[in-house]
Every structure is written in structure tokens, then in C-alpha cells.
Image (cartoon, rainbow, N blue to C red):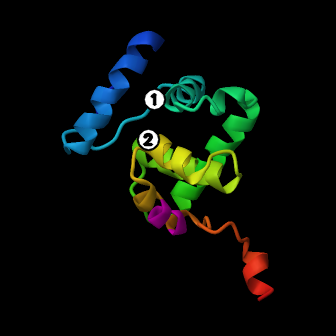
Amino acid sequence: MTIQLNFDKNNQQRLIKLVEWLQDLGIIKSYKLADAQNRLEYFIAKDRSGTLSRLLPNELENIVQKAKQRLADSNVKNSDGMLCVVLAALLYDAEIFSAGQAAAFAGMAKSDFIRQLGKFKVSSFGETPADISAL
């Protein structure tokens, strides 16, 4: 069963934590934010370091699109919570976030975040496939 709830922007930002908690408990299987602009605002608000607010909106949107594609290519359950992990991985790979900032953004311990990187084809050491091939 699918239920659609529409909230104004202010209430959506306040209720997203509740929805994430309900998803962690297994009560909600998945959810989506209403549109791309709300999603970008959510990611910017979730970043406690303020780093994402300094990016141009189209830069962030491009990274979010790459994250959505990377998530679709992986064998991982697609949800907005997992999209945050993939987005954090790509921001770490692009050297926009440190590993600690990315882990905090993803809502997990740094060691757990680093273990997740391989699922999304991101090196925890910063090497590219070309670097590894050259060895």
C-alpha cells in the first residue's frame, strides 16, 4: 500500500526525522521527498558543517543525480536514507567532505561509513581505478 502525505516545506523539514525513525523501526518501508528543490534543501539542512550550503545548487543537484544513479546500479535497497549514504560517499570521493563529515551526514559511525564505500565504488583511500591499474 502506498500513502502520499503532502506537507508544506517547513513541516516537511520538521517531520522528516520522524519519518526516518519510523523507517528505521520498519513501520515505513520507503518514502520520497516531494521534489528536487525540497530534497536539496533537506540535504543542505542535514549538513551540520555548512559545506553543502556553499556549493552552487546545480553542483549539488549533479552530485545528487550521480548518487541516485549509483544507488540504482548497486544491489542496495533504495530509500532516501540510503541516498544520504551514497551522497555522502560521493561528497567524500569529491573531497568536499572529510570521512568524519560524510559519516555524520550519513548518520553513522565513521568506521561503518568507510565499510559502506565499496558498495558504491568509492575508494576509502582516494585511489581511482586508473591508479590501481598502474600498480
Foreground residue, 98 or 86?
Answer: 98
Q: Residue at x 67, y 44 (%)?
A: 63
Question: In this picture, which residue range is highlighted in magenta?
Answer: 114-118
- Magenta span: predominant SS is helix
Residue situated furthest bottom in the rendering: 135
Cα distance in 3D space between marks 2 and 1: 8 Å
Do tag 2 and tag 1 residues touch (Cβ < 8 Å)?
yes
Q: The residue under label 1 is which amino acid type?
A: Leu
Foreground residue, 132 or 38?
Answer: 132
**Relative to 123, does residue 110 appear above or below in the rendering?**
above
Check disc 2 and report the residue beneath it: 80
Indicate the secondary structure of the residue bearing disc 2. helix
Q: Residue at x 61, y 28 (%)?
A: 50
In the displayed structure image, the side of residue 33 where residue 37 appears, left or right: right
Instruction: Specify which label sits upstream in the sequence, 2 or 1.
Output: 1
In the displayed structure image, the side of residue 25 where residue 85 appears, left or right: right
How packed is label 1: few (under 14 Cα within 10 Å), some, or many (20 or more)?
A: some
The image position of residue 14, as x and y in percent, is 37, 18
Indicate the secondary structure of the residue bearing disc 1. loop
**Relative to 10, does residue 57 appear above or below in the rendering?**
below
The image position of residue 130, as x and y in percent, is 79, 77
Q: The residue under label 2 is which amino acid type?
A: Asp
Residue 101 on the magenta span: no
How packed is label 2: few (under 14 Cα within 10 Å), some, or many (20 or more)?
A: some
Label number found at residue 33: 1
Q: Residue at x 75, y 32 (%)?
A: 58
In the displayed structure image, the side of residue 6 where residue 71 appears, left or right: right
Q: How many marks?
A: 2
Label number found at residue 64: none
